[in-house]
Image: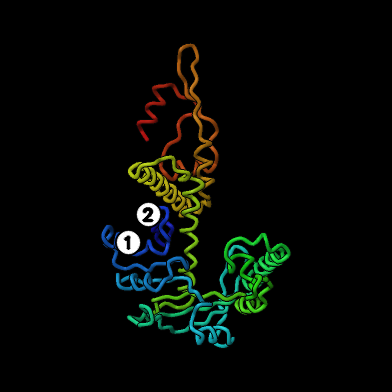
Amino acid sequence: MFIDRDGSPIGYELFSGNTFDGKTLIGALTSLKKRFGVRRVIIVADRGINSKLNLQAISEAGYGYIVASRLKSMPAKVKQQALDGTGYTPLSWNTDSGEVTVSVKELPYTNIIREGHRAVGHLEEQLIITHIIKRAHKDAADRQRLLAKAERFLENPSSMKGQLKRGGRRYIKAEDTAETVFSLDQDALERDAIWDGYYAIQTSEKNLAPREIIDAYHTLWKIEESFRIMKSTLEVRPIFHWTEDRIRGHFVVCFLAFIMERRMELLLSKHEVAATPLKIREALNDMMITRITLDDTVFYVKSKTPSLGSQILRLLRVKPPATLSTEQLWRDWISGI
C-alpha cells in the first residue's frame, strides 16, 4: 500500500500470498509511475525492501529512498567507523514520553551492485548512524531473553527444532564431533552486544540533513498503523472469498472505507480533535435511531449523540436529526444529507 506523508492512502497492489515482500517493489513502482504520473517520490521503507536490486530499481525509476540499513552486514570499514565513538552529534526530539536525545553520525557510502563477484554498478548514498541509550537498554534486555531461551534449549537439546541462528538458538553452536554436542556461543553474544543501541538508515537523499532523514523515516509507523487499521478496525481479514475477482472486489471496498476513515481522522485532527480510528468507529456506531410504531403511526427516536459524534456531524456539515421525527420528517432528513 502507498500512503503519503500525512498517512493518506494513495493506492495499493495485490500479490499472491506466497510472494516475498522484497520482490514486490519493482512492480509496484511501475504501477505508481503509470497510474499516477508522480514525478518526485522519496520511498521510505523497512529492511524488507532494502536489497541492492530494489534500491537500484528505485534509483533507475527516478525516485529517491530512505531505508533501514543492515549495519551489521556493512563492510568492515563502515562498521569500524560506526563503533569508533567519534564524529557523533547529539540531536533531541520531543516525544509523548518526553525528550529523547539521539547521537547521530553521517557517513558517505558507495553501495556496490554486484552480479556474482563482478561489480555492475554503484549507488552514491548517505549513511545515517544513530545511537540511543534507551534503545541500548532495550537491545540488552531482548538479548537476555534470547539467552534464557538458549539456556533452556541446552538443558533439553531434544527440544531444539528448526535451524540454529534463529530465536534463542542463535546463541547455540554445534560442536563438530562424532556425536553432535551443543554449547553456548559466547562469541555470538559478544558480537551482538557491541551493537546495542545502534541503528542505521541509508538514503539517496544527500541534500537532506540527518534530522530531516530521521524524521522522514519515522513516518514509517503510519503505514504500519494503516495495515493495523485495515486488519483490525476494518476487518479486512479473514477473507471469505475464493476467486480472484471477488478477492479484488473485497479489497476495493476495504480500501474505500480506509480512505473515508483516514479523511475523517485528518479532518478531526485539523480542527484539533484527537480521535483514534477505533474511537471514530465507536462514535459512529453509538449514533442510534430507534423506529417505533404507536397507534399505527411510525416515529423515529434519536438516542443521545456522543460528543465525538456531534463533532463529526458538525465538521461534515450534517445537521443532526430531530430527537423525535415522524416518518415524513425522517425521510426529509435522509434526502437532505
Q: Determine which quarter of the picture holds residue 146.
A: bottom right
> Against 117, is 140 above or below?
above
x 42%, y 66%: residue? 49
Secondary structure category for the residue under label 1: helix
- 40 vs 98, nearest the viewer: 40
- Kind of residue sitting beneath label 1: Gly
Q: Looking at this rendering, what residue extends furthest in the front direction?
A: 178
Q: Quadrant of the N terminus?
A: bottom left
Could you tell me if the residues under marks 2 and 1 are in contact, i.e. CB atoms within 8 Å? yes
Q: Looking at this rendering, what residue extends furthest in the right direction?
A: 155
Q: Determine which quarter of the picture holds residue 41.
A: bottom left
Question: x, y percentage for residue 98?
Answer: 62, 67
Q: Which residue is mark 1?
A: 27
Q: Which residue is mark 2?
A: 15
Instruction: Rate crowding at label 2 as few (under 14), some (14 to 19) or many (20 or more) other CA atoms within 10 Å.
Output: few
Q: Quadrant of the C terminus?
A: top left
